[in-house]
Amino acid sequence: MKFSGSNDEDDEKEMTFWEHLDELRGSLWRIIIAILVTSIGAFAFKGVLFDDIILAPKSKTFITYRAFCKLGEWLSMPSLCVDPSHFQLINISLAGQFTSHMNISLIAGLIVALPYALWELWRFIKPGLSDKEIKGSRGVVAIVSLLFVTGVLFSYFIAAPLMINFLGGYTVSDAVTNQIALTSYVSSITMMTLLMGLLFELPVLILFLTRIGLITPKHLRKYRKHTVVGILIVAGVITPSPDVFSQVIVAIPLYALFELSLALSARIYRKKQAAAAE
């Protein structure tokens, strides 16, 4: 990796291992500080963080449930109109509410600071890349951030409410009342959100694997049917509801991600083939 002290190539000097390490340490510290600052900000706005965001999917006035109700009326499917307030959240641990507040604040800070963290990592890696590699990676920070945020929003507005509605109202007997621990509710929401955020990075992963030659568009097309089955299984796990409509709502975006990944893989593969033929 090199850095330039002037425009004169003779002035360029190679960074030593310890200089690399110092640069990395500086980037990591700035990332940690950014996450701490955004987490503290989230912690300070407890009412917004919990009442308006985390606990919102438990209310029947949540935008997703209202949209489903209108869709149910239009399709003559009253089962789409649900009321998720049929279970009670309780705290059974002395430090349960404080711990949940800390955990959610940290995760919120991580999500908000992610674009900056990715930019810092890119700034560290960029000097070690060739001009061609830099050109080919243009916009990668924005794309990765956008995909992750899209996955988070999809989870929050679609996948998580469906999961909450089904699991929160599921009973094995009328003699058993659902009283859900706050920590269980919070961990389910956050795990689902982070999982979907990472799952939406599939196009970036496929793009990288195609670039280094581990997969080709031919492989992806060959296993398209298997992928569809896998997506349906994932959708069934995310929305463990017997309602097929809910599973389809989750499965369609995931399949669209696969097709986008296939299209990107085919484009990169064609470029590699053209470059090799020259």
Image (cartoon, rainbow, N blue to C red):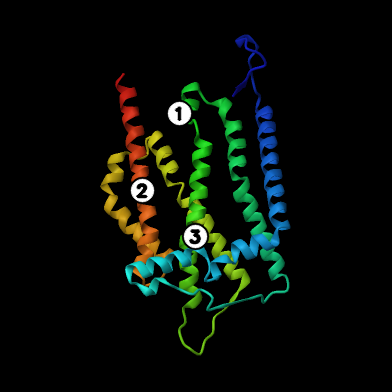
Residue named by callout 2: 258
Which amino acid lies under the numbered mark 1 shown in the image of this protein? Gly
State the separation of the CA atoms marked 3 and 1: 33 Å
Q: Seen in the image, is 198 located left or right of residue 55?
A: left
Q: Earlier in the sequence, mark 2 or mark 3?
A: 3
Quadrant assignment for the C terminus: top left
Q: Residue at x 50, y 23 (%)?
A: 130
Query: Looking at the image, is 145 positioned above or below residue 89?
Result: above
Query: Label 1: few (<14), some or many (≥20) within 10 Å?
Result: few
C-beta proximity under 8 Å, tags 2 and 3: no
Residue 157 bears which disc, if any?
3
Query: Looking at the image, is 230 positioned above or below residue 120?
Result: below
For the residue labelled by badge 2, is the local secondary structure a helix, a strand or a loop? helix
For the residue labelled by badge 1, is the local secondary structure a helix, a strand or a loop? helix
Which amino acid lies under the numbered mark 2 shown in the image of this protein? Phe
Query: Residue 190, image x and y in percent?
Result: 57, 60
Q: Seen in the image, is 114 located left or right of residue 234?
A: right
Residue 136 bears which disc, if any?
1
